[in-house]
Amino acid sequence: MGRIIDKISIILLTVFVMGQLFHGHFLIIMVYASIAAAAVNYYLLTRDRSDFSMKPNDIKEHISFIFTIAGSFVTILFPQTSISIPNLLYDITRSRNYIALILCVIGMILGFSYIPLPLYLLTLLISLISVYLSIRSESASIMSKNFHRLRDDSSEKNEKLISQNLSLEKAKDNEIYTAQLSERNRIAREIHDNVGHMLSRALLQTGAMLAIHKEEPVHTELADLRSTLDTAMNNIRSSVHDLHDESIDLSGGINQMTELLRESGRFKVNVEIDAENNMPRDVKYAILGIAKECITNIYKHSSNSEVDIKIIEHPSMYQVVIHDYDINSSSSTKAKSDTDFLSNGIGLANIRSRVESLNGKLSIYTDDGFKVFVTIPIK
């Protein structure tokens, strides 16, 4: 909008000077030519420059250069038309068209003999104003673009910072959770190794005493003691199993298994786990076992590069998908894992037995690499 106002102002000033020198049809021709030249260059020149090099970059700028040079050359052929040079100087300043600038200077020198001195001086003044307005508008445009770029960069950096903060918080929560699981596992092991063994020893001693002391009321009291010890032993076993079950981290286990693929440098592994960690112990063990079989097979035999591992918990079932994509277009050059895994039968049998023990369903697809699809119902 600023450049339109600049051009209108310069045209009005130039037309005023023209009206003092020209009359009739020639004045109309000069006015329309000035307006047309300003409009054409406004359309063709769309890039602001931060340097002073004369380097037209596209076809539109090349056309503008030729058009401006032709207009400047007219002021040499007809020195009286040099009174319209302020219109050209606005676009010359913006485009760095030094060839046209030299032609305009020559035209102004030649026009000195054809234009009255007051009008000539007024034309020089308008030319200076034109150059000033062009430089000012260009600087304002560059500053505006720099401001918008800085604002966009700042917004992008803020988004990245927020994302990194969320990642750090998530990593911190994972570390805390891992530490909790490790501590639970340690407590379960300590209870099992120490308290459990001591209770087992006490039960054996009580059983021996029951065999020796048949008289009452000692026998009855020893039987009650043994019953109490049995109850305590069962409670400890249950607590140890619960602690151990909670210490099994499905996500951590899967990610630890996939490190084998990542560290090899041959695979891009995408892991998606959307399941609660409080799933039953037998389901956790089955999923970890299935993943281990598939990942080991992929590492040994696959010639592909991308692996997807998805574990999704739905309202009625758990879904496990392990997909080793086929990157080859020909079916004859598929990954070796397809045929090796199926023909060997050991890995497939292990997976099938785990799935069937949980009343699940196993499907294997080989049309796009190698895909293991498992569904396990939620009890």
Image (cartoon, helix red, strand yellow):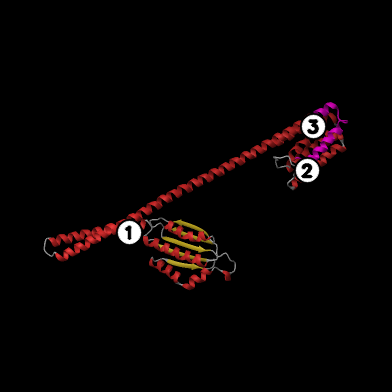
Whether residue 136 is visible, yes or no, is yes
**Disc nearest the viewer among 2 and 3:** 2
- The residue type indicated by label 1 comes to His
**Disc nearest the viewer among 1 and 2:** 1
**Disc nearest the viewer among 1 and 3:** 1
Secondary structure beneath dot 2 equals: helix
**Which residue is labeled 1 in the image?**
241
**Which residue is labeled 2 in the image?**
65
Instruction: Please state which of residues 79 and 24 is positioned toward the viewer in this rendering.
Output: 79
Q: Residues within 10 Å of mark 2 (few under 14, many from 20)?
A: many
Q: Residues within 10 Å of mark 3 (few under 14, many from 20)?
A: many
Q: Is residue 144 found left or right of 261 in the rendered image?
A: right
Instruction: Please state which of residues 77 and 242 is positioned toward the viewer in this rendering.
Output: 242
Q: Is residue 146 found left or right of 363 in the rendered image?
A: right
Q: Residues within 10 Å of mark 1 (few under 14, many from 20)?
A: some
Number of numbered callouts drawn: 3
Residue 47 percent coordinates (x, y) = 70, 42
Of the numbered discs in the image, which one, if any, rests on residue 210? Answer: none
Overall secondary structure of the magenta stretch? helix
Mark 2 or mark 3, which has the lower sequence index? 3
Mark 1 or mark 2, which has the lower sequence index? 2
Image quadrant occupied by the C terminus: bottom left
**Which residue is labeled 3 in the image?**
15
